[in-house]
Each structure stands twice: as structure tokens, then as C-alpha cells.
Amino acid sequence: MTPILTVQDLNVRIAGQQVVEDVSFDVAAHGVTALLGRNGVGKSSTLKGLLGLYERSGEVTFDGTRIDKLMTHRVVQQGIAYVPEDREVFSQLTVAENLRLAERGGAPQRALVDELFPELRQRANQQAGTLSGGQQQMVSLSRALMNDNQLILVDEPTKGLAPLIVGTVTEALKKAAEITPMLLVEQNLQVVRDLAHTVVVLSGGRVVHTGPADEFLDSDLVQRHLGVSSDGKAAEGLDEEPAEKADGPASSTEAKEDDT
């Protein structure tokens, strides 16, 4: 099957400094492709480079069309959605207003969003800034799912979330991926195992491994490239971080990692 996205020799620069170098990989037209690597290797920068949020060069072909020269809003109009690591909800607007702003075209997929995140329907009139981090993540995912996209880029959707919310987000991503292919950046290896069929591994801003997810996760390559063992404990993720409480508002001082 022809890939939905083909990346060839992608280079990404931030303020003139090169952070991604000659990265090449494909994203299948179905299911989830996971982009893995230690912190700071260029995973988030790769996503932002694909979107044109950072200076980039190289060749990016989406559904048969070159998009590497397009501005970000034109890339999105081609049918690519983006769920950022730091959620970026409009905190002063309600949940319903956040979702309305995401609508593009005349047929928003409200039924899908309501099915995946019924809790948001109950909180439609609540300001997004008063939601917990997990609930804000639901809003961020819902905005991407509101439109009939052909690809979704998802950056660290379970980072810092309580285990119960991780499960909810994982199940939502699994259902969404049955409809729309995804390129997923994720540190939690159990989530990767549950969702991904293919992994692309970065190290030092370059691709060092591509292959089936299960084969990679069950091999010593996990230790070599990610710095964790391939036993059961590796399912907890690459970096231990305190999970937020499921029912508390997200901290306004929450740390933001631009390049994970």
C-alpha cells in the first residue's frame, strides 16, 4: 500500500541551529506509526518541521502531493491535523467554543467526538483552563478529530497523565486510528505496544531504526536506542514523571518541552 506520507532527507532548524538531519521515513496509510527516541533527539521538531512550524528543507510528500514548500495553514488544509504536546487549548474559552474554532468545512464529526469523549459533552460550557490536564488532552484530541483529516500528528498524548486517563486516551487513539492514520510521538512503551504497527527511531536527529513495533519492543534495540530494558518495566515509559491527579485542573506553570 502506498504510504500516506513520505519524508525524504528532512532537515529542521531552530533559530539557525540544525536539530533534525537527513531524516527519511514513511507513514502507512492505515494504523499508527510511532516516532521514538530519547528526550532531545528531535521527535517534536520533526513533527513541527513537517507542518512548517520550523524552518525545514527536504522532500515531504503527502497523499501524492509535495507539501514541504507550503505554509502551515496550507499543510493543514491538505488534511493533516496536529495534537501538540502541550495541548494548547484556549483556556478562557469553553470546551464547546474550543471545538467550534477547530471546525473546518461544513460537516464536523461531532458524533465521533461525543462517542470517544462523552465527558466533554457534559463539560461543554466549562472554561477549558479549569479542566484537568487529562480533560484538556481530550479537548486537544477532539479538535483534531472534528474534521475529516487524512493524517493526524500526535505529540506525547499521555505525558504526565494519571493511569486511568492514559487508558482513556489510548482507547480513543485506537478507535480514531481505525479511521485516520497517525504519526505518534510517545514515551510510554505500553501505549506504543498497544497502538503502533511500525516504529521509526531517532537518535541525534537521525533515523537509526525502522521496523515492526513488536519486533523492536521485544529486542535489545530498546536498550540501545531508548536507554530502557525490554522487560515488563519498560512499559512504564522512557522517563519517570509524576502523573497529575485525574480530577484537578492543569497547572498553569506546567513545564513545556519543545523538543522531546
Image (tube, helix red, strand yellow):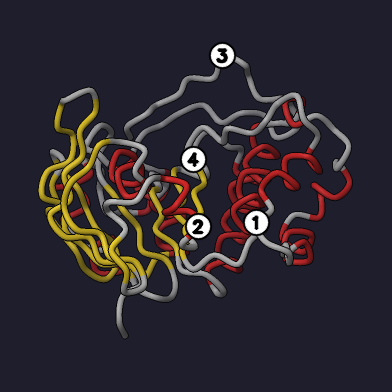
Task: Name the quadrant containing residue 230.
Answer: bottom left
Marks 1 and 3, how far apart at CA: 31 Å
* Residue 104 numbered mark, or none: 1
At label 4, the amino acid type is: Pro
Question: Which corner quadrant holds the N terminus?
Answer: bottom left
Residue designated by label 4: 84
Marks 4 and 3, how far apart at CA: 17 Å
Marks 4 and 2, how far apart at CA: 17 Å
Marks 2 and 1, how far apart at CA: 9 Å
The nearer-to-camera label among 2 and 3 is: 2
Mark 2 closeness class: few <14, some 14–19, many ≥20 residues within 10 Å: few
Are the residues tagged 2 and 1 within 8 Å (C-beta)? yes
Mark 4 closeness class: few <14, some 14–19, many ≥20 residues within 10 Å: many
* Residue 253 numbered mark, or none: 3
Can you give x and y, in whole percent of width and height, for residue 34 in the image? 35, 58
- Indicate which disc, 2 or 3, sits on the residue closer to the N terminus: 2
